[in-house]
Image: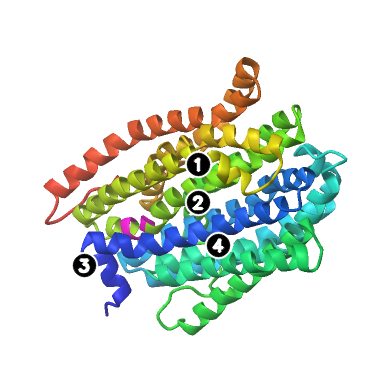
Amino acid sequence: MKTDHTELFTSAPVPKAVLALVVPTVISQLITVVYNMADTFFIGQLGDSNQVAAASLALPLFLLTTGMANLFGIGGASLVSRCLGSGDEEKARKTSAFCIWSAALAAFFYGLIMLLFKPYILPAVGTDQNTYGFCYQYLFWTITIGAVPTVLNAALSHLVRAEGYSAQASFGVALGGGLNIILDPVFIYGFKMEIEGAAVATMLSNLIAMLYFIALILKKRKTLHITFDPRCYTLGSHIPAEVLLVGLPSCAMNLMGVFSNIMMNRLMVSYCNEAVAGIGIAKKIDMLAFALANGLSQGVLPLIGYNYSAKNFKRMRSAIKMTLILCLSVTLVAAALLFTCATPIVKAFIDDAETVRYGSVFQRIICITGPFTAITMVIITIFQSVGQKLKPLILSMLRKGGLDVPFMFLMNALAGVNGIAWATPMADCCAMLTGIILFVPFWKKLRLAENEFSEKPQFIL
């Protein structure tokens, strides 16, 4: 029997289906970015550039939790949506159990590693005597204590969205973000915990969001295929390979992003902590454009994956076209806004003239990447939604780490501190061009499948 959510995948008008899936996802992504920016904003109001720098240095390590969530969440969402499209409900349940328990274990061990090896990890990311203590305080609460709820919060949102419950998934993510914004000033100023208070607020907000998803799944267990039952956990049926290989590009992009941010911070440290604080603020602000692209692409993933498995290539192509146009349009507007309003936006975070000077220049450079990122992210998501592994992995590696780190060293030598920031748009432009080259043959084959096999499709990409 079809539910309203399966009709969204199968028969609702494509514009309605795309918007119903992506709008809540984009809103939740934006709220997530806002709450990430809230940490920097509220810490910045303390007027201590060392604490702002410490938050910037801690960010790459915290973002590893997003990589874990993407590995199991996006990989699992792709497989679940394809299983539902082909009618294999039992495999969908086993996939969800594998993703949930594996994500929880990975997050637990990451928190343990951070606790045991902090004396080696923190200096490696660029901390000095002025930032080490602040950085450790932040990471203790957000990773050692908070890794499991942070990872499960995001992973469960992907799995819930894969079944068509985009609004509920987005509400859970938004709930965590909204709580973090409320709790930040309470702990930072009210309890006078400063940067440690921001970390406690982040941990608590993710914990509450995780509990929301658990309650939602238990309440709708009769209609959802997501299960916490450990008896459904399996390493068989090719589930681990399908989940991990499809989720790997998003995870790799995150891991390489962490590596990229660490290298950028280490290069910036060679100039001054104000430069580190400035690039940290600029990168946080630019996450708005990335959130738009990421929300639009992630939102449409289950729609593409479902129709691919159902061999409804006409509907699949229509969804792809609309998503590309929408994503590019929105990110162009965002880039223009961030470029023209760079100085007042950065100044809102910290009233330190030197940090504002660095941050404004860096923001104008980095915001150029928005449209490039939009196209690349949609192409990566399309490949992931149909179960392809190598192409999205290549694009992910190019975007972060593969090209931008070499560009950082090259541009640092040629243009100094501003050259380091220019590495980001240069790398994203190259990744976009590579993505287009890989996508064009795929699109042509998809069009042939629609035209030639509409009655009895046998097309395999």
Amino acid type indicated by mark 4: Ala
Amino acid type indicated by mark 2: Gly
Amino acid type indicated by mark 1: Cys
Q: Is residue 261 left or right of residue 25?
A: right
| Residue at 61% from the left image edge and 25% from the top image edge | 418
Mark 2–mark 4 Cα distance, whole angstroms, equals 13 Å
- Tell which tag, 2 or 3, sits nearer the viewer: 3
Mark 3–mark 4 Cα distance, whole angstroms, equals 28 Å
Q: Can you identify the residue that label 3 sits on? A: 11
The image quadrant of residue 220 is: bottom left
Q: Which mark is residue 77?
A: none
Give the SS element for disc 2.
helix
Is tag 1's residue or tag 3's residue first in the polypeptide sequence? 3
Mark 1–mark 3 Cα distance, whole angstroms, equals 43 Å
| Residue 202 sits above or below residue 139 on the image | below
**How many numbered discs, if any?**
4
Is tag 3's residue or tag 4's residue first in the polypeptide sequence? 3
Give the SS element for disc 1.
loop
Mark 1–mark 2 Cα distance, whole angstroms, equals 36 Å
Is tag 2's residue or tag 4's residue first in the polypeptide sequence? 4
- Tell which tag, 2 or 4, sits nearer the viewer: 4
Of residues 375 and 285, the one drawn nearer to the viewer in this rendering: 285
Q: Can you identify the residue that label 2 sits on? A: 247
Which stretch did the figure color magenta? Answer: 300-304
